[in-house]
Image: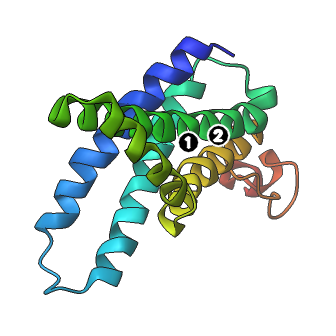
């Protein structure tokens, strides 16, 4: 596992999900139906997280892809939370220029972590990452049993003449 690769890919993914996916969902005319907007955002974010997981896992061994995918998903979740924390405190410091104001805002981060949207954030990073890792570990394709006989030469048209 390369921690630098995990941090950089998940940071880029977090940025693109928070900006591009949110902009795409905002452009969909849903006439104020916020539930549909959340569902569409969650689905598109999960697809994007899956793409970033594939990018992370493409050069790794497929024998432990499930574990590596789950680690990437959890790491990306931590990167997203840390990014939100750092951007929040730096925004307060940039707007007020006061460390005392910064200290008074820090307790507000606790309710942010305990919000249901943080659970959604965990879900759209970890679930697609683990699912993609499982799929890659299983060989990247669904293995289906062969229909008919195992000897395909005997069922060819030439052998029936």
**Going 60% across and 27% down the picture, which residue do you hit?**
57
State the SS at label 1: helix
**Going 51% across and 22% down the picture, which residue do you hit?**
7
Residue 150 higher or lower than 85, as above or below: below
**Going 15% across and 71% down the picture, which residue do you hit?**
28
Question: Residue 1, percent across and down?
Answer: 69, 16
Residue 47 higher or lower than 91, as above or below: below
State the SS at label 2: helix
Of residue 2 and residue 61, the one placed in the foreground of this image is: 2
Of residue 77 and residue 6, the one placed in the foreground of this image is: 77
Mark 1–mark 2 CB contact (< 8 Å): yes
Question: Residue 133, percent across and down?
Answer: 68, 40
Q: Spatial distance from mark 1 to mark 2, Cα to Cα?
A: 5 Å
Q: Quadrant of residue 58?
A: top right
The answer to whether residue 133 is left or right of residue 90 is right
Identify the residue under disc 2. Answer: 74
**Going 52% across and 65% down the picture, which residue do you hit?**
115
Residue 52 higher or lower than 145, as above or below: above
Question: Residue 101, percent across and down?
Answer: 31, 39
Q: Quadrant of residue 129?
A: top right
Identify the residue under disc 1. Answer: 77
Q: Residue furthest front?
A: 100
Q: The C terminus lies in which quarter of the figure?
A: bottom right
């Amino acid at each position: 596992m390369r921690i630098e690769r995990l941090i950089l890919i998940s940071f880029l993914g977090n940025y693109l999900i928070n900006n591009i996916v949110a902009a795409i969902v905002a452009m969909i005319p849903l006439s104020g139906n916020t539930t549909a907007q959340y569902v569409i955002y969650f689905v598109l974010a999960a697809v994007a997280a899956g793409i970033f997981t594939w990018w992370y896992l493409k050069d790794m061994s497929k024998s432990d892809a499930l574990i590596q995918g789950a680690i990437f998903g959890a790491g990306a979740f931590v990167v997203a939370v840390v990014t939100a924390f750092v951007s929040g405190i730096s925004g307060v410091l940039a707007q007020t220029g006061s460390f005392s104001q910064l200290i008074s805002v820090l307790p507000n981060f606790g309710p942010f972590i305990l919000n249901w949207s943080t659970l959604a954030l965990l879900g759209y990073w970890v679930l697609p990452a683990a699912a993609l890792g499982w799929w890659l570990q299983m060989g990247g394709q669904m293995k289906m049993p062969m229909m008919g006989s195992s000897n395909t030469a005997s069922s060819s048209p030439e052998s029936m003449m």
